[in-house]
Image (tube, helix red, strand yellow):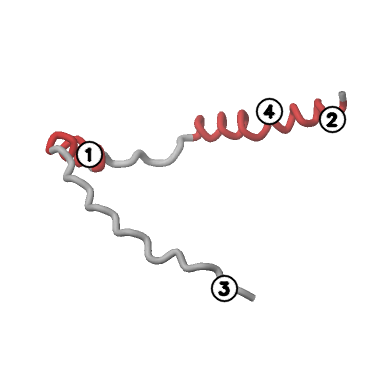
Amino acid sequence: MAEPASRGAAPALAPLPALPPDLETRLAAFESVPTPGGFDAASWFWMILLGVVIPLGLLVLGWRA
């Protein structure tokens, strides 16, 4: 059985140019924003209603039709 032809090593990528200073500043500000906490009770209610209860109800109605 013949072995596949070797493609050789991939060429090295050129280094990326430095980001502009104003972009560096904006990125640093964006990354320093703290992430919000978890969801509150009302959010959980709506997520479960819209993501589980209603889709299941539509499936049941579709099976009966």
| Gap between marks 3 and 4 measured at Cα | 57 Å
If you read the primary sequence from the N terminus, does the residue marked by circle 3 or circle 4 appear first?
A: 3
Callout 4 secondary element: helix
Relative to the observer, which residue lies in front, 43 or 1? Answer: 1
Mark 3 or 1 closer to N-term? Answer: 3
Does label 2 or label 3 sit earlier along the sequence?
A: 3
Question: What residue does disc 3 label?
Answer: 3
Q: Is residue 3 left or right of residue 7?
A: right
Measure the C-alpha gap from mark 2 to mark 3: 55 Å
Identify the mark at residue 54; answer none if there is no mark.
4
Residue type for callout 3: Glu
- Label 2 sits on residue: 63
Q: Secondary structure at mark 3?
A: loop
Q: Mark 1 or mark 4: name the one nearer the start of the chain.
A: 1
Above/below status of 56 relative to 16: above
Q: Position of residue 21 (x, y in %)?
A: 12, 38
- Label 2 to label 4: alpha-carbon separation: 14 Å
Q: Residue at x 51, y 30 (%)?
A: 42
Q: Is the residue under label 1 in contact with that under label 3 (CB below 8 Å)?
A: no
Q: Earlier in the sequence, mark 2 or mark 4?
A: 4
**Residue located 61% across and 28% down the image:** 50
Relative to residue 4, is residue 30 drawn left or right?
left
Which dot, 1 or 4, sits closer to the camera? Answer: 1
According to the image, label 1 marks what residue? 27
Distance CA(mark 2)–CA(mark 1):
50 Å
